[in-house]
Amino acid sequence: MGGKVNKIDIIMNPNKFEELKEELNKIGITGMTVTNALGCGLQKGHTEYYRGVAVNINLLPKIKVEIVVAEVPVESVVETATRILRTGNIGDGKIFVYEVADVIRVRTGERGFDAVVDKK
C-alpha cells in the first residue's frame, strides 16, 4: 500500500485545545503531539500595565499541535481546525502543512504510508 503522508502543525491559543481535540477525534485523528509554547505574531504580543507603567509582553502562551496524516485528508483537518479556532481576532493561530519524505515505525520497521496507518 502507498500514499502521501503529511504533517500538520497548528499553533493556537490554549483555551480552544479541548474543543479542537474532540473535533479532530470525530474526523479520525487518533494521534497527536502537543507542546506548550510561547510566541507572538505580527502584533508583537500585547501591552500590560505593572504599577501603572506600560510593559510590553512579547511572548504569549500558545500550544503547538503536531499531527501526521495519511488516511484522513489534510483539507478535513485544516477545515476542522479553522472552524474551531477562528474568532476573527488577532492571535487565532496558524496552520502549517508539510509533505513528509519518510516515516519509520520503530517497533516494526515499516516505512512510509504503512508506518502511519493502523492495520487492524
Image (cartoon, rainbow, N blue to C red):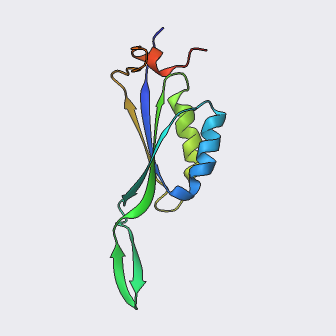
Name the residue rendered at 47%, 22% in the picture: 116
Which quadrant holds the C terminus?
top right
Where residue 71 appears, as percent x and y from the top left, is 54, 21
The one nearer the camera, 78 or 7, is 7
Against 80, is 120 above or below?
above
Q: Is residue 18 left or right of residue 45?
A: right
Name the residue rendered at 36%, 84% in the picture: 54
Q: Is residue 89 left or right of residue 28?
A: left
Q: Residue furthest front?
A: 107
Where residue 36 appears, as percent x and y from the top left, is 43, 53
* Quadrant of the image occupied by residue 21: top right
Q: Residue furthest bottom?
A: 52
Where residue 67 appears, as percent x and y from the top left, is 47, 35
Name the residue rendered at 57%, 39% in the picture: 79
Against 77, is 17 above or below?
below
Count of numbered circles on the image: 0
Q: Residue furthest right?
A: 26
* Quadrant of the image occupied by residue 25: top right
Name the residue rendered at 52%, 19% in the picture: 117
The one nearer the camera, 52 or 90, is 52
Against 69, is 15 above or below?
below
